[in-house]
Image (cartoon, rainbow, N blue to C red):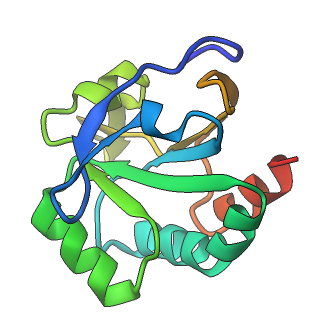
Amino acid sequence: MLEIGKKAPDFTLPDQDGNPVSLKDYKGQKVILYFYPKDMTSGCTKQACSFAELYPQFREKGAVVLGVSKDSVASHKKFEEKYGLPFRLLSDENVEVIKAYGVWQEKSNYGKKYMGIVRTTYLIDEEGKVQKVFTKVKAADNPGKMLEEIS
């Protein structure tokens, strides 16, 4: 995980429309950068839909929401369209950004160990520094808690 107060690693990733998105594009705004395992799964859908529901309030507070997973641009597009998501979903198929943010970790399911994304949310301030890190977040509760964190 990244340390609070440190500069968040910049990146450029394609969004669900294939357009490049860089962290530096959001200088001057708070960024909720959330990493999630997979499009269309129950937990990830709950998290995305909760962010979508609260999105106008995030925008009122001058914050943007960016979701990141290793799913393809096409998968993100289907996810966005199916649930009417109003924010950008970024595709990191090479897991470079996912690794840079420390969320590619060993996981375990029914005793089987594998590498995957640990659901994590970063709050990045207007200067591009890590303000808060939330690990092992509960998918459905995460968006509401993030809204409370933004001053």
Using the image as rendered, state which of residue 135 and residue 150 is in the foreground. 150
Which residue: 13% across, 33% down? 94
Q: Position of residue 24 (x, y in %)?
A: 45, 30
Residue in view at x 29 percent, y 59 percent = 38
Q: Quadrant of residue 18?
A: bottom left
Question: Residue at 54% of width from left, 56% of height from top?
Answer: 65
* Position of residue 59 in the picture relative to residue 122 (left or right): right
Name the foreground residue: 87 vs 143: 87
Q: What residue is at 28 percent from the left and 85 percent from the top?
A: 81
Please determine whether, in this image, residue 104 is positioned above or below residue 53.
above
- Residue 109 vertical placement versus 55 (above, below): above
| Depth order, front residue of 115/31 | 31
Determine if residue 58 is in view: yes
| Count of marks placed on residues | 0
Q: Position of residue 140 (x, y in %)?
A: 62, 69
Where, by quadrant of the figure, is residue 82 drawn? bottom left
Is residue 44 found left or right of 56 in the rendered image? Answer: left
Q: Is residue 1 above or below residue 73?
A: above
Q: Determine whether, in the image, residue 15 is placed left or right of residue 45.
A: left
Residue 36 visible: no
- Residue 62 location (% of width, % of height): 71, 54
The image shows residue 80, relative to residue 65, as above or below, that is: below
Image x and y of residue 72, in percent: 13, 57
Left or right placement of residue 34 versus residue 110 in this view: right
